[in-house]
Image (cartoon, rainbow, N blue to C red):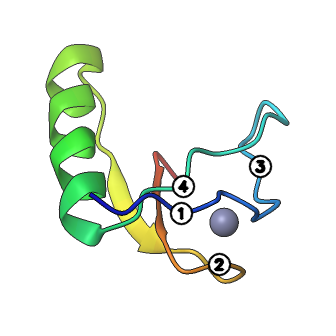
Amino acid sequence: MYYSNGKCSCTGKDGRKKRLYATEFEAIDTANYQSRLLGVQLRVYECSDERGWHITSN
Ligand SMILES: [Zn+2]
């Protein structure tokens, strides 16, 4: 499976670097899992810097 180098500089609300997912499917899969785990609504968006996807609760 292809993994991005994660060179993007996107950070979350806590100032930590956001995890970059190589595929939309992987990001959605993880978001669904974490949504159930944390009981929060999460969504997926395409990174503006790098080829990849992020998860956000905003
Ligand atoms: Zn990014």
Q: Secondary structure at mark 2?
A: loop
Ranked by sequence position, the earlier of labels 1 and 4 is 1
User: Residue shown at 43%/56% (left/top)?
Assistant: 21
Relative to 49, 25 lies left or right: left
On the image, which quarter does residue 41 sit in?
A: top left
- Residue indicated by mark 1: 4
Relative to 3, 27 lies left or right: left
User: Residue shown at 27%/43% (left/top)?
Assistant: 31
Q: Quadrant of ligand 1?
A: bottom right
Marks 3/4: CA–CA distance: 10 Å
Relative to 37, 56 lies left or right: right
Dot 3 and dot 4 residues touching (CB under 8 Å): no
- Amino acid type at circle 1 is Ser
- Amino acid type at circle 4 is Leu
| Image: 6 above or below 41 | below
- Residue indicated by mark 2: 50
- Residue indicated by mark 4: 20
- Residue indicated by mark 3: 11
Q: Within 8 Å: ligand 1 and the Cβ of disc 2? A: yes
Q: Position of residue 30 (x, y in %)?
A: 25, 40
Crowd class of label 3 (few under 14; some 14 to 19; many from 20; radius 10 Å): few
Ranked by sequence position, the earlier of labels 2 and 1 is 1
